[in-house]
Image: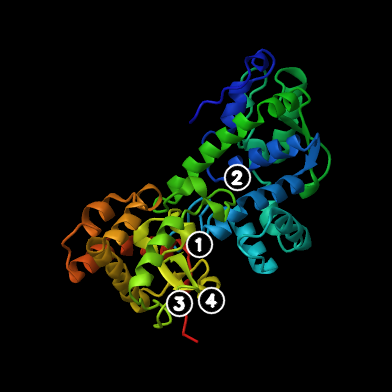
Amino acid sequence: MMELTVNRRYYNKLDIKGFEKMMKDPSYCYKFYWLEAIVQLILVGRTEVTYDEIIDEMIANAWYSVVEYHIHLSGIWGDAGVKDNLEKAVIKLHKLSELPANASKVEIVNSIKQFNKQLHAEKQALTLNVPYKALSGFANKVGEKISLDSSAGRMMAYYNKLNETDILLPYTFGTGNGLHRKLLFGADWIPMIKDNAVIILRWIQCEKVKWLQNNNPEVPGLIYKIEQLEDKMRKLSHVRKLWDGILERRSVTDVFTDKVIDRQQYDVDHFIPWSFVMNDELWNLMPMDSSLNSSKSNRLPHWDRFFKPFATNQYIMYEMVHEAEGIRKLYEACYRDNLHSIWANQELYRKGNSKAEFLRILEKNMRPVYDSAWNQGYEVWEWQGV
């Protein structure tokens, strides 16, 4: 577990080590999202909140990981069922709201309010343990001892008493029942959290990423999949220039339409979705009809139908890189942003591969990535033509 280091002046009055243990030994991902939501709510000036408000923030924060990137927050059961109630809440909200995966946080929060009754069971399940378990690092240090498996009422009474007599807590339990139960943020903790918010949120993010990566071992680039990212992160300009150069010299057939690509109406897109691979490697990029890009969206092309045409276009590019000096220079301009995979540089794009060898190397390396995306829940695009 990463050590949290905050401004030293807070160590004299607050149990920072106890606070650090709020991330320790999770059974599910809830602790990460719970504390993250509390920090965010404190930053907007809240001094008390309900369970319901915290969980709404948790759902909104988990949206992109679950919906956009198909991350399992706490893994899956042997029958492929989702383990995690937060993930279940996000999935249900997505189905009810029909919001796009890249919806804004405002749209997500508004939809949570709209479908609050339908989400009640999943939200209620999130209150069963995490409010009390998150404080376990402060328990049993002095005074009365308590089993951490005690009832909710017993734990609330214990922590409230502990806060009054021995140890100041980040929050205590107020009035209300169920999702309407209030949390009262500790007056001495609020300035500490505000002063160190960037450090605390990075610490939570680091622990969250380690947890999610452990539960999604085949997912690449997971550190980029815990919040919404802008399209401007994609670096396709040099690849576009490369394909422009190729299309100036010869015709290339669109992978999906089987028609010659129009230089004025094509996009450079990812065969395996960018949201899964989280990179712009040349081996996964193709020119395609601009009108189909939004239809394909975040889905996998049908492998048996479309891999060979895709690989054939890759081979056309490969041939021209080694035959045309101008194309070679455009290819070399891709090194900084689009040519990082060792296998691609050492095997795929080396000079001398026959078409059969090239296609075999590409399939050998791409198919496992494709299968991992499919196993993670990415849909297959069953495009039937126009």
Name the N-terminal-most of marks 4 and 1. Answer: 1
Residue at x 73% of width, y 54% of height? 106
Amino acid beneath label 1: Gly
Residue annotated with mark 1: 81
Q: Tag 4, which secondary structure?
A: helix
Question: Does residue 114 appear in this view?
Answer: yes
Q: Is residue 109 above or below residue 285?
A: above
Q: Quadrant of residue 259?
A: bottom left
The CA span between labels 2 and 3 is: 49 Å
The nearer-to-camera label among 4 and 1 is 4
The CA span between labels 3 and 4 is: 11 Å
Q: Tag 3, which secondary structure?
A: loop
Residue annotated with mark 4: 291
Residue annotated with mark 3: 262
Q: Position of residue 88 (x, y in %)?
A: 60, 59
The CA span between labels 4 and 1 is: 36 Å
Mark seen at residue 30 = 2
Q: Quadrant of residue 369?
A: bottom left
The nearer-to-camera label among 2 and 3 is 3
Crowding at mark 3 (Cα within 10 Å: few <14, some 14-19, many 20+): some
Amino acid beneath label 4: Ser
Q: Horizontal placement of 302 versus 28: left or right?
A: left
The CA span between labels 2 and 4 is: 41 Å
Q: Tag 1, which secondary structure?
A: loop
Question: Does residue 26 appear in this view?
Answer: no
Q: Tag 2, which secondary structure?
A: helix
Q: Position of residue 190 (x, y in %)?
A: 75, 27
Q: Position of residue 157 (x, y in %)?
A: 75, 31
Name the N-terminal-most of marks 3 and 4. Answer: 3
Q: Position of residue 383 (x, y in %)?
A: 47, 80
Mark seen at residue 46 = none
Residue at x 68% of width, y 19% of height? 14
